[in-house]
C-alpha cells in the first residue's frame, strides 16, 4: 500500500468520526490528512509527513474551526432577541444602573441602565440587551 493511500484512509476515518460526533473537531484532522496525502506523493520521509500533518492540523484547528463553528453551529438561543431586543417601551419606575422596571407585552421586567445614566419614570427607553431576567435599556 502506498503511503498516500494510508494517509487518505486516515482522512476518511476522521470524516466518519466527524459524522458521528458533529463538533467540527475531526474535520480539521481530515482536512490535514487529505492535504498531507497530496504532499506525500512528492515527499517520502515519514517524519516530514507527520510534521506536516501536525502543523496542518494545528493551523486548521486554530484558524478554520472558529470560522466553521460561527457559520454552521447554531447557538442555543432563547428567542428573546427577536421578541424584546430593540423594542421601545416606557419606564414604569426610575431606572438606574442598579434598579428599575419596564413593562413590555404586559410583562413586568427588571431593568438597568446600559450606560449608568438616570432614566426617569415614564421616559421612552430602548431595550439593548438582556442578562437572564434583567433588561438593559438606554434612553431614546
Image (tube, helix red, strand yellow):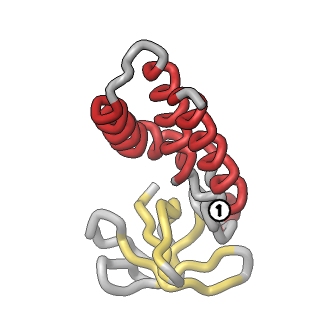
Residue sitting farthest toward the front = 1
Rendered residue at 45%/37% (across/down): 64
For mark 1, give the secondary structure: loop
Q: Identify whether 132 is placed above or below 41.
A: below
Q: Identify whether 74 is placed above or below 43.
A: below
Query: x, y percentage for residue 75?
Result: 61, 61
Rendered residue at 46%/79% (across/down): 111
Between 128 and 60, the residue placed more toward the observer is 60
Q: Is residue 59 visible?
A: no
Q: How many marks?
A: 1
Q: Quadrant of residue 121?
A: bottom left
Between 20 and 33, the residue placed more toward the observer is 33
Between 83 and 93, the residue placed more toward the observer is 83
Residue sitting farthest toward the top = 42
Query: x, y percentage for residue 80?
Result: 64, 68
Q: Is residue 40 visible?
A: yes
The residue singled out by tag 1 in the image is: 21
> Which class describes the residues within 10 Å of circle 1: few (<14), some (14-19), or many (20+)?
few
Q: Is residue 126 left or right of residue 49?
A: right
Quarter placement of the N terminus:
top right
Q: Identify whether 44 is placed above or below 128.
A: above
Q: Is residue 36 left or right of residue 2?
A: left
Query: x, y percentage for residue 31?
Result: 53, 35
Query: x, y percentage for residue 100?
Result: 42, 84
Q: Identify whether 107 is placed above or below 75.
A: below
Amino acid at each position: 500500500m502506498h503511503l498516500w493511500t494510508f494517509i487518505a484512509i486516515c482522512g476518511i476515518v476522521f470524516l466518519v468520526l466527524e459524522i458521528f460526533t458533529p463538533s467540527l473537531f475531526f474535520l480539521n484532522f481530515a482536512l490535514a490528512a487529505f492535504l498531507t496525502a497530496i504532499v506525500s506523493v512528492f515527499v517520502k520521509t515519514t517524519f516530514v509527513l507527520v510534521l506536516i500533518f501536525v502543523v496542518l492540523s494545528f493551523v486548521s484547528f486554530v484558524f478554520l474551526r472558529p470560522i466553521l463553528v460561527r457559520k454552521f453551529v447554531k447557538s442555543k438561543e432563547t428567542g428573546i432577541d427577536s421578541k424584546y431586543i430593540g423594542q421601545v417601551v416606557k419606564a414604569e419606575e426610575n431606572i438606574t444602573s442598579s434598579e428599575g422596571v419596564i413593562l413590555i407585552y404586559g410583562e413586568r421586567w427588571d431593568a438597568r441602565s446600559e450606560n449608568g445614566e438616570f432614566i426617569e419614570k415614564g421616559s421612552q427607553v430602548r431595550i439593548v440587551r438582556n442578562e437572564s431576567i434583567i433588561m438593559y435599556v438606554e434612553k431614546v
